[in-house]
Image: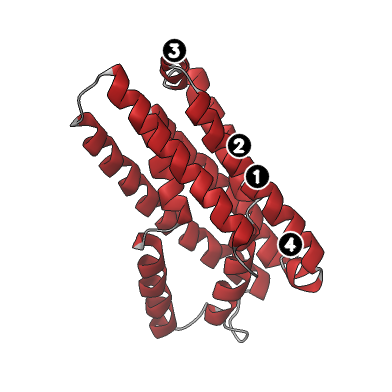
Amino acid sequence: MPSLDVLLAFAVTTAIFAFIPGPAMLYAAARTMAGGRKAGLMAVLGIHLGAYAHIIAAAAGLSALFHAVPLAYTCVKLAGALYLIWLGVSLFRATDQQEENATAPKGGRRAFAQSVTVEILNPKTAIFFLAFLPQFVDSGAGLPIWMQLAILGTVVNLIFTFADVVSVLLADVILARLKRSSGVQALVRKAGGTILIGLGAHLALQKG
């Protein structure tokens, strides 16, 4: 494995990235606003389990496909963006009864499954791992490069998971202070939908 100095730099850099509000953190907060703490936590679980697909791809060198075939990158990016927008629109159209169902076990499983899909369809995650992890790989280490990439990727994912769980818990505390009326619930749900639509639009319009 890399030297202690390199690993320390890796840990500090990863923590900085993790706790700067980004798309994953905003997505987890939006799911919390729409369905409560359980939905938010299930969304975090889905996001970061989905991220392991990108970690495996980076370790195997498959993420380089997005660099070699720009059309593939664009197609996956647009699919992920449209899916996010669809989720946001569905929150706008949801009724109070549907919101209550979202807090049920079935709703938690739905948030998990949707979040796995969102993450797998996010090529930005693949590019991030492909660009970030090799900077901390030691070609002279005893472990093969693919294994170093897998280990470093797992550590990154765990740190980001912790940061996103914190964002869910903070969002839940804020929501708990709001008056639990149907009007407020509907407003909060629409705010969550707006965030998801905004994330989808940002992903679709972002270059490279």
| Residue indicated by mark 2 | 86
| Residue indicated by mark 1 | 82
Picture layout, residue 68 above or below residue 171: below
Tell whether label 1 touches label 2 (CB within 8 Å).
yes
- Count every numbered label the image shows and give the total: 4
- What separation in Å lies between label 3 and label 1 (alpha carbons)? 25 Å
Callout 1: few (<14), some (14-19), or many (20+) C-alpha neighbours within 10 Å?
Answer: some
| Residue indicated by mark 3 | 97
Tell whether label 1 touches label 3 (CB within 8 Å).
no
The amino acid type found where label 3 is placed reads: Gln
Q: Quadrant of the C terminus?
A: bottom right
Point out the tag, 3 or 1, that comes first from the N-terminus: 1
- What separation in Å lies between label 2 and label 1 (alpha carbons)? 6 Å
Camera-side mark, 4 or 1: 1
- What separation in Å lies between label 2 and label 3 (alpha carbons)? 19 Å
The amino acid type found where label 2 is placed reads: Trp
Q: Position of residue 105 (x, y in %)?
A: 47, 19
Callout 2: few (<14), some (14-19), or many (20+) C-alpha neighbours within 10 Å?
Answer: some
Q: Position of residue 22 (x, y in %)?
A: 43, 58
- What separation in Å lies between label 4 and label 3 (alpha carbons)? 38 Å
Q: Secondary structure at mark 3?
A: helix
Q: Which mark is residue 73?
A: 4
The amino acid type found where label 1 is placed reads: Leu
Callout 4: few (<14), some (14-19), or many (20+) C-alpha neighbours within 10 Å?
Answer: many
Residue at 63% x, 56% y is: 204
Q: Secondary structure at mark 1?
A: helix
